[in-house]
């Protein structure tokens, strides 16, 4: 089965490294070339807004899922194909998982890590088997990957972390990984 839709989990802020915004926009644009559509958090700020705007510029279908509580914080995107306003974060994550074939994790904060670890946990428990790619711009996730390898080395993971989580350094590399499935 080829990947048709990709959920992107990322920051609702820009971060300090300009490469983060560049890669978010590039990934959105590259989805158009790859014939995939975007599922994301529904915001119009930060990396979220950049990936959505990049995808919209490429003519890609963009589906946003935003909880009511975050509408004021993340300024829901008015220009996307579909916007689902849901009750809470749990409903948001579940809907995003249901709408995607694979997930990409970009730089972000606590919410992004929550989404990453829930996807990894659900994969481990066989709740789903969706491909997960970590976009490690400028080494943003180097320490996290080292920690997960330490968890594995200390016997706390059921399998090699690389079986569940692939790492890309650029948006282009991430799209190539998605196309290889």
Image (cartoon, rainbow, N blue to C red):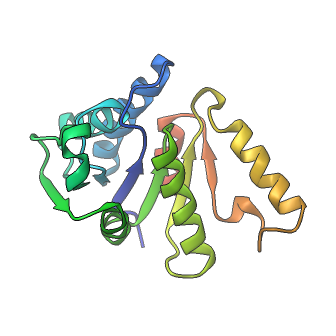
Q: Residue 35: where, in percent of width, then height?
A: 29, 52
Q: Is residue 23 left or right of residue 29?
A: right
Rendered-image quadrant of the N terminus: bottom left
Quadrant of the rendered image containing residue 140 = top right
Q: Residue at the location (39% across, 50% down)?
A: 8
Q: Is residue 39 left or right of residue 181?
A: left
Q: Residue at the location (48% across, 48% down)?
A: 112
Q: Residue 15: where, in percent of width, then height?
A: 46, 25
Q: Residue 39: where, in percent of width, then height?
A: 30, 55
Q: Residue furthest right?
A: 154
- Of 175 and 147, the residue lying toward us: 147
Residue 101 in sight in this render? yes
- Of 57 and 8, the residue lying toward us: 8
Q: Residue furthest front?
A: 69
Quadrant of the rendered image containing residue 49 = top left
Q: Is residue 139 above or below residue 118?
A: above
């Amino acid at each position: 089965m080829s990947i048709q839709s990709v959920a992107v989990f990322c920051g609702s802020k820009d971060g300090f490294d300009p490469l983060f915004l560049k890669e978010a926009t590039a990934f959105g644009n590259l989805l158009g070339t790859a014939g995939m559509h975007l599922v994301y958090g529904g915001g119009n700020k930060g990396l979220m807004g950049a990936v959505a705007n990049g995808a919209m510029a490429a003519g890609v279908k963009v589906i946003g899922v935003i909880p009511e509580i975050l509408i004021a914080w993340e300024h829901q995107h008015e220009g996307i194909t579909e916007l689902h306003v849901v009750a809470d974060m749990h409903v948001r994550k579940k809907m995003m998982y249901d709408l995607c074939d694979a997930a990409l994790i970009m730089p972000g904060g606590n919410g992004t890590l929550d989404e990453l670890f829930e996807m990894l946990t659900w994969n481990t428990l066989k709740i789903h088997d969706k491909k997960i790619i970590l976009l490690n711009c400028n080494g943003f996730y180097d320490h996290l990957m080292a920690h997960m390898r330490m968890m594995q080395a200390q016997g706390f993971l059921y399998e090699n972390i690389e079986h569940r989580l692939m790492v890309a350094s650029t948006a282009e590399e991430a799209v190539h990984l998605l196309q290889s499935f």
